[in-house]
Image: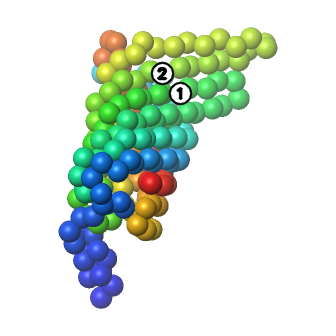
Amino acid sequence: MRVFPIALLLLAPAVAPSTAAADPVVAVGVGGGHLGCATPEGSCDGAGPVQAGSLTVAAGGRLDRNLALLGLLTVATHNDSDSTVSQFVLAPTLRAWIAPMLWLEGGVGFAHTEVSHMSGGLETIQRSDTVPAVVGAVGVDVVRAKDFAFDVDLRGARGFYANDVHVYQATLGVGVTL
């Protein structure tokens, strides 16, 4: 039964990669997934979500062995031949290791969206207002050492724009936490 050792690792008392309180924490990750826009009537453009790449950077410090307070920046971007759509989310988050290899992260912050179009050698850029946003993630440390962890994570973020417009991102990624 190979399930038992895996379950034992996930359910044993949680210990984050570095166990000292007040240690700094730095995390960097990349991923792929979807970027979309929704209104009460459906999709903003009728096409639905598009494929997007993402970059996540977080830095902060441990509050105790299994809890860290982080400042997080996540960016999801979609490019096609003549346009780029990006959503930037900046938020303070709490990351909690609920088992030795399993963590949850969440926070409330701010989002901003940019759309750029290239036509006839002229680029136009439209920028949204900065609006409230929520972020969340769940990750599994697949490789752990005393001072770092390599993880696979599922992340989501949603910005709440005017007129009940919601721009969201959902990605599956890999990351390193130091």
Residue identified by numbered label 1: 86
Q: In this view, does 38 lie to the left or right of 120?
A: left
Looking at the figure, which quarter contains the C terminus?
Answer: bottom left
Within 10 angstroms of label 1, few (less than 14), some, or many (20 or more) residues? many
Q: Residue 81: which quarter of the image?
A: top right
x and y percent of residue 127 in the render? Answer: 51, 13
x and y percent of residue 38 in the render? Answer: 38, 26
**Residue at image x 29%, y 74%?**
9
Which label number is shown at residue 113? 2
Relative to 167, is 117 above or below? Answer: above
Of callouts 2 and 1, which one flags the residue occurring earlier in the amino acid sequence? 1
Look at the numbered disc 1 and give the secondary structure of its residue.
strand
Q: Which residue lies furthest to the bottom in this view?
A: 1
| Amino acid type, mark 2 | Thr
Q: Which of 43 and 24 is in front in this view?
A: 24
x and y percent of residue 11 in the render? Answer: 22, 70
Alpha carbon distance from label 2 to label 1: 6 Å
| Amino acid type, mark 1 | Ser
Q: Nearer the viewer, residue 89 or 43?
A: 89
x and y percent of residue 8 in the render? Answer: 25, 77
Residue contact at pointers 2 and 1, CB within 8 angstroms? yes
